[in-house]
């Protein structure tokens, strides 16, 4: 049963702590209150920092093999509980069960990947070119880290940060999204069961979140911030981090272009487009947000997308035959509706959708629009089931439009000639590019963007180094 996974208290120094102030967590498909979770006050923020600071030498001094085995056990426990954890995600987030199950599998893989990386951090030992000394480079944990995670992947964004922090030997204070704290608390419970020492992982929930994060960043014990969220909030956190020169890694907003070349295989391309657009109901920073289609294939592609979107079944995510669930909240659904309404008022052609379904719940109909290249909708991260299509003449025009704007997280390219598609991919200003695929996220690969889509990388060989400092020692041997 999912209810056995629900924790409604803070997690401080290995203990579950109850507070008077509560945060309601609701099922966005029904409006039902799932839980009332304790909210942290200033004394709890301080307690979390105290616990993390005390645990810092403990986890840093724990042999890498032991840290690795903790993470491996966490992977195994999480994998065993996939179904219950997926149902918990669906209840508080709204996504369909298929997406939630995929998220749990993805989330657990970060524990397995960084269990392996914990024991493979390489250093350097070599003679200086001048011959006067030996250069030794090793790595040490950066220290107490603040982790701030979003609502759209409430388990995976937590493990993507917690796993490398623990692998590196860093204690953390985690502030999960106020809409979806239950999945984060369930993950922390798994880590405790896996043997992570008290104080290494501390969880504070807050609504509004701004004061708690500002307080944490102002504390001299905090050495590192890892944030996933909007670019606007990321900019503000960078300003605050600058006061104490807190090290930061940030995965910020995306506005992914999906470029369709005129030699693309239509069936394969539409299949990739539907995954890129509709994974997680479109509520992903990696979601295809702008379909840039060359003239020769534009009409059949738009028609095929219309048909595919109309085949989706909208409803509560826990229903087995639902293929598109609810947005995380009514306010989030209304943002999507407002963006589409604005585009339609400016002349966008509606091929399907563009409406709020009747009845309760934070639902929005799958939507396909034909949009002019200059429409402001293409500069907005929609975060929902909306596919705007724009027609272009050639590769050069497609690349120019794809690179427009300040987001550079991920881009997509589909084409029949892989060499040509790869040539286009290498001209796209993004940290990640998918070629003839609708998803490329992988714990074994570096995840991150260019321009205002973030700083640093998560996952891959690079991920653990966001929680490590390089240390150079010069020795006269």
Image (cartoon, rainbow, N blue to C red):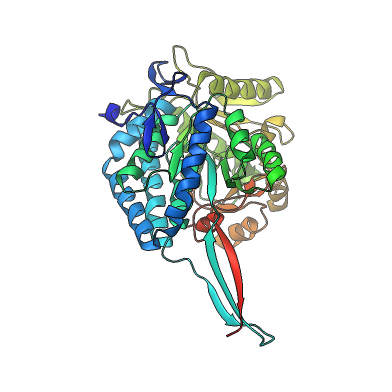
- The percent coordinates of residue 129 (x first, y second) are 67, 85
Residue 226 vs 370, above or below: the answer is below
Q: Quadrant of the C terminus?
A: bottom right
- The percent coordinates of residue 327 (x first, y second) are 49, 25
Residue 376 occupies quadrant: top right
Single out the residue that lies furthest toward the top: 359
Is residue 442 visible to the viewer in this orientation of the structure?
A: no
In the image: residue 298, left or right of residue 117 = right
In the image: residue 89, left or right of residue 285 = left
The structure residue drawn at horizontal position 33% and vertical position 49%, both measured from the top left corner, is 75
Q: Nearer the viewer, residue 208 or 108?
A: 208
The structure residue drawn at horizontal position 64% and vertical position 59%, both measured from the top left corner, is 426
Q: Quadrant of the N terminus?
A: top left
Q: How many marks?
A: 0
Residue 63 vs 177, above or below: the answer is below
Is residue 88 visible to the viewer in this orientation of the structure?
A: yes
Q: Nearer the viewer, residue 233 or 293?
A: 233
Q: Nearer the viewer, residue 61 or 457?
A: 61
In the image: residue 117, left or right of residue 207 = left
The structure residue drawn at horizontal position 57% and vertical position 28%, both measured from the top left corner, is 209
- The percent coordinates of residue 451 (x first, y second) are 69, 48
- The percent coordinates of residue 174 (x first, y second) are 49, 39
């Amino acid at each position: 049963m999912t209810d056995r996974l629900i924790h409604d208290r803070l997690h401080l120094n290995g203990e579950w702590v109850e507070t008077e102030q509560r945060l309601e967590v609701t099922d966005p498909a029904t409006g039902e209150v799932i839980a009332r979770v304790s909210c942290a006050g200033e004394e709890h923020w301080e307690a979390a920092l105290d616990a993390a600071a005390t645990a810092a030498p403990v986890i840093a001094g724990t042999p890498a093999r032991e840290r690795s085995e903790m993470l491996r056990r966490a992977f195994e426990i999480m994998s065993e509980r996939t179904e219950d954890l997926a149902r918990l995600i669906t209840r508080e987030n709204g996504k369909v069960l298929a997406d939630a199950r995929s998220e749990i599998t993805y989330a657990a893989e970060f524990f397995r990947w960084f269990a392996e990386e914990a024991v493979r951090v390489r250093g350097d030992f070599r003679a200086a070119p001048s011959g006067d000394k030996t250069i030794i480079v090793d790595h040490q944990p950066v220290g107490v880290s603040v982790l701030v995670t979003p609502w759209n992947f409430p388990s995976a964004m937590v493990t993507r940060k917690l796993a490398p922090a623990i692998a590196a030997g860093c204690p953390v204070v985690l502030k999960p999204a106020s809409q979806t704290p239950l999945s984060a608390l369930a993950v922390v419970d798994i880590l405790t069961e896996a043997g992570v020492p008290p104080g290494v992982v501390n969880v504070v929930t807050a609504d509004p979140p701004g004061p708690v994060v500002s307080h944490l960043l102002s504390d001299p014990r905090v050495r590192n911030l890892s944030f996933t969220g909007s670019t606007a909030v990321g900019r503000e956190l960078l300003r605050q981090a600058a006061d104490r020169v807190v090290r930061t890694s940030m995965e910020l907003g995306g506005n992914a272009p999906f470029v369709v070349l005129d030699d693309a295989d239509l069936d394969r391309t539409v299949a990739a487009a539907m995954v890129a657009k509709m994974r997680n109901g479109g509520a992903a920073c990696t979601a295809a947000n702008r379909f840039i289609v060359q003239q020769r294939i534009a009409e059949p592609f738009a028609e095929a997308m219309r048909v595919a979107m109309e085949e989706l079944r909208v409803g509560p995510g826990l229903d087995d035959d639902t293929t598109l669930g609810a947005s995380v909240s009514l306010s989030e659904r209304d943002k999507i509706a407002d963006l589409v309404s604005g585009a339609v008022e400016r002349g966008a052609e509606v091929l399907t959708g563009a409406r709020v379904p009747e009845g309760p719940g934070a639902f929005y109909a799958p939507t396909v629009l034909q949009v002019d290249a200059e429409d402001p909708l293409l500069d907005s991260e929609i975060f929902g089931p909306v596919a705007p299509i724009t027609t272009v003449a050639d590769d050069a025009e497609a690349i120019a439009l794809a690179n427009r704007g300040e987001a550079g997280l991920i881009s997509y390219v589909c084409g029949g000639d892989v060499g040509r598609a790869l040539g286009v991919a290498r001209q796209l200003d993004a940290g990640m590019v998918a070629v003839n695929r609708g998803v490329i996220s992988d714990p074994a690969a570096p995840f991150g963007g260019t321009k205002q889509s973030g700083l640093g990388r998560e996952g891959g060989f690079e991920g653990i180094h966001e929680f490590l400092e390089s240390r150079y020692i010069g020795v006269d041997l």
